[in-house]
Image (cartoon, grey):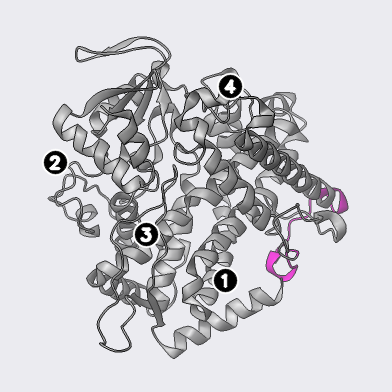
Amino acid sequence: MFISSYLGLLAAVSLVVYWFYEWSKEYGPIYQTRIFGTTHVWISMESVAQELLAKRSTIYSDRPMIPNLPDNRTSGEYLALLGHTDTWKHQRKLCNGLMHASNLASLHSYPTVERDRFLYLLCLDPANYIEWIEQFTGRTISWLCWGTASPAQVLRHTTFGLLETISPAGSLPNMVTFLRHVPWWMSPWKKKEQARHQLEGRLFRANVDHVTGGMALDHGHDSKDRNAKGNGADNPGKGEPAALSENPHPAEPSFIRTFFETKSSPDERVRARWGEPDQASHVVGLMAIAGALTIGSPIQSYILAMCHFQEWQTRLQQHIDEVLGGRCPQWEDRAELPLLRAVVKEVIRWRPPVPTGIPHASERDDVYEGYHIPAGATIHALEWGITRDESKYPEAETFNPYRWLDPSSPVYREPLTEYPKLSGFSQFGFGRRTCQGIPIVEQDLFLTMGGMAWAFNIGCKKDPVTGEDIPVHWDDYTPLLIAKPTPFDFQAVPRSEGRETQREVESRRLMEME
């Protein structure tokens, strides 16, 4: 298979995943290529991925080395990229503990607060939708990680830089691997990553200092009305972290606060299990990076889907109105809104945020049904192919949320008060490398997609001369590891004056606090 063609196609992720998917039709659900001396194994069927990456997780839980981030497997800074090491095991336990505590508190209502702000901004200026979505994801995860929205702008800058660093199409050494040996002074990509990494480190340290300072100001404080306090101004630029401690407030609930509260436990075993503050800073920082990078993709894909499949927007609006009597969906309504949960899951299936999957690495030789997989191979669960398996997803390229609600469908599960849900979905990984942030993703997407359906009629813009729909692209996505739709024009028309007024009053109050 021709490497030059492979490199050329990296310029367009939709072509890359399509090509790998087409090869699976020719070579089967598991095949391999060799790219610059490395064996790459491509899996396009969920049952094969489950057998290898989940059932044989002792072999396939490692991560490959990223040429432009060569210490990704050992540094302890990025949990999702760490090798299968003791550091990874400890950090994973810490991440689970932090997520469990916040999930019990329903994520402290942060996603709801930021969802209302997002709807208000989208109503004011739909053309700036990408900015509003990025603000929503960055602010929500900043609240969860550090109890303030102030770091969101710098976080957005550093995380996008990291995405470029780790993506095959983002950094030249990731495609032409021998370039990683070029001296630092001749490597603009190394200089860029070093500057990004230093800024990220300053941001994370400032955020931890903000939380510990707030806890010292009023130890044990637990605000009953966090929204009445204000959250600090958004950082005016992307160059440096905000001076969060200049106007200190008692520390709001957050992952970092939970860590320090647990570390003050009188039980020595509990304190030892949660590790040291530096490690917690890295774990929480990675949670922030993941939330800021990934959640925006399906929100944008939802808008794209509504431009192409208007009938599902109408059905979803009717469902919400019938169940909720005209009010905006809240997280507490999820059991009564199976169609909304189906729409969320179908958006992710229809346009996977990570279409090539996050790669695993084999730690030793293995054999699968007579097929030899060498140690050190890079294993890709090709999500684009997995979600187009016609035996599970008939007419896979059609956006059809009903496939999750139809008792005759291969993917139907009961009870509908619980299913469909995102837990266990192939899009979130396999085995020991399953995403730990699913509760955040699920709540963010439920609220934003439900809120948009409640508030707006989304569709194609009209040509002012002909009155015809202005075409919107179908599958033109960015070429990085986490793919997002390229910008497109659409209209978001408020559904009624009453809904607009309700949204405006609440969101204006939130905006005034900033």
Dot 3 or dot 2, earlier in sequence: 3
Magenta segment, which residues? 215-232
Q: Residue 23: image x %, image y %?
A: 20, 33
Establish if 229 lies above or below 352.
below
On the image, the x and y values in percent for residue 151 come to 69, 54
Residue position for label 3: 301
Name the residue located 48 percent from the left edge and 31 percent from the top edge.
Answer: 174
Question: Which SS class for mark 2?
Answer: loop
- Residue 5: give x, y in percent of width and height: 30, 35
Quadrant of the rendered structure where residue 45 is?
top left
Classify mark 3: residues with Cα within 10 Å, few (<14), some (14-19) or many (20+): many
Tell me if residue 381 can be seen: no
- Residue 455 in sight in this render: yes
Instruction: Choose mark 1 or mark 4, whichever is in front.
Output: 4
Residue appearing at x 87%, y 58% in the figure: 246
Mark 2 to mark 4 CA distance (whole Å): 46 Å
Percent coordinates x, y for residue 331 in the rendering? 47, 61
Which quarter shows the N terminus?
Answer: top left
Which label belongs to residue 117? 1
Report the magenta stretch's main SS. loop
Q: Would residue 326 be counted in the magenta stretch?
A: no
Element type where label 4 sits in the image:
helix
Cβ–Cβ under 8 Å for marks 1 and 3: no
- What is the number of the mark on residue 299? none
The amino acid marked with disc number 4 is: His
Disc 4 marks which residue? 181
Q: CA distance from mark 1 to mark 4?
A: 47 Å
- In this rendering, the answer to whether 500 lies above or below 477 is below
Q: Residues within 10 Å of mark 4 (few under 14, many from 20)?
A: few
Q: Which residue is mark 2?
A: 391
